[in-house]
Amino acid sequence: MKIRTLLFGAGQGARQYIENNSSSREFVGFLDNDESKHETSFEGLPIYAPFMLGELIYDQIVITTQWALDVQKQLINDFGVDVNKVVLPEKKQLKKPTPFLNPVSLDLARHIVKAINTLAIERELPLATDFGTLLGIVRDDDIIPWDDDIDFSVPVERAEAAEAVCQRFVEEQPRTLFWRLEKLKNNAGKSAGLLIKFTDPNGEVSEFTTSVCFRENVDGNALHMPSLGMWYAPVEYFDQTEVFLWKGTQIQVPKNYLSYLSFVYGDWKVPKKDIQLSDYAHTREVSFEDVKSAAMSCELLEQSNAR
């Protein structure tokens, strides 16, 4: 018998979770804190307000929003849901199949890391290779096969210089792919980061995103702005960078990068394929109201046509 499942968060993560788990679960609807979605539908299923939980029949609630820890507390503390019925899925369940299992995509990812670092170093921009990209390079000497994007961070004060580096990168790429550069910003127009994306008209390269995320210094912590500071680290890791030689190319990494990896991942030396949000060593609570008020959106800055 399939598990009757409510999904909390009507978005892309939920869509992918349904695709990945339809054989074992019966999806009965969505919960969402966004009032504008209530009494509408997504993927053919109704979207309910959380206060309606008492009227719904389900076996489990799977949290598919990025703000999983906040939602988990909401369900257990505010609505009295049995902790055993609340599921924090593995990150891979919320995303498309890993692009770096495709050798062509893996080669492109290596090229992106090298090329953007080279441009940043030329311009004395303290752009640090970050998160899973940093972890793979330091621990495995390569991109992690089950990762799904490329991550960089840069102080928000250098946002303009970072944008120039990304624009230059896009301009220099061969036109075998369709490239675009987007700016991530909140409803006040404040930039939170840059996204480099591509599509392959021939379908040979699996798509992935390169994120250049801005970090803001608040009370001694470098807050990751796209997540509204859910991910953070002491500012000492990002006030300057170190240079790490990788496959013949100098790349920039956070200062004291081994300590930084421990701060983010805890025991980072042991590969963990099925990582969950709760596995991170340090995260900061971000409320749904903060997310709603920020209203992040993307603005197209540049694009290039494949030929």
Image (cartoon, rainbow, N blue to C red):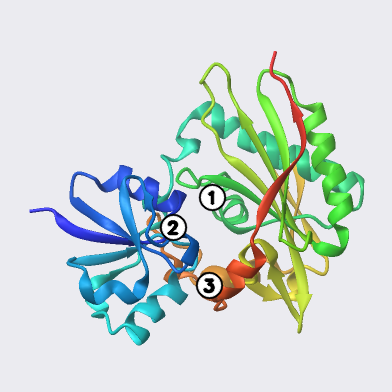
Residue appearing at x 75%, y 30% in the figure: 303
Mark 3 Cα-neighbour bin, 10 Å: few <14, some 14–19, many ≥20: some
Q: CA distance from mark 1 to mark 2?
A: 9 Å
**N-terminal of the two: label 3 or label 2?**
2
The disc labelled 1 sits on which kind of residue? Asp
Residue 114, which numbered label?
A: none
On the picture, is 225 further left or further right than 67?
right
Residue indicated by mark 1? 140
Residue type for callout 3: Phe
| Residue 271 - label | 2
Q: Nearer the viewer, residue 141 or 72?
A: 72
Residue 139 image offset from top left, x and y in percent: 55, 55
Q: Are marks 1 and 2 in contact (CB under 8 Å)?
A: yes
Counting from the top left corner in percent of width and height, residue 53 is at 27, 73
Callout 3 touching callout 2 (CB < 8 Å)? no
Q: Nearer the viewer, mark 3 or mark 1?
A: 3
Name the amino acid, label 2.
Pro
Q: What residue would you read off at disc 3?
A: 288
Residue 230 drawn at (x, y percent): 59, 71
- Secondary structure at badge 1 equals helix
Tag 3 secondary structure: helix
Which residue is at the far top?
307
Q: Earlier in the sequence, mark 1 or mark 2?
A: 1
Q: How many marks?
A: 3
Q: Are marks 3 and 1 in contact (CB under 8 Å)?
A: no
Q: Is residue 196 above or below residue 60?
A: above
One can see residue 247 in this view: no
150 or 111, nearer to the observer: 150
Whole-angstrom CA distance, mark 3 to mark 2, is 31 Å
- Residue shown at 37%/69% (left/top)? 49
Q: Position of residue 271 (x, y in %)?
A: 44, 57
Query: Disc 3 versus disc 1: distance between alpha carbons?
Result: 36 Å
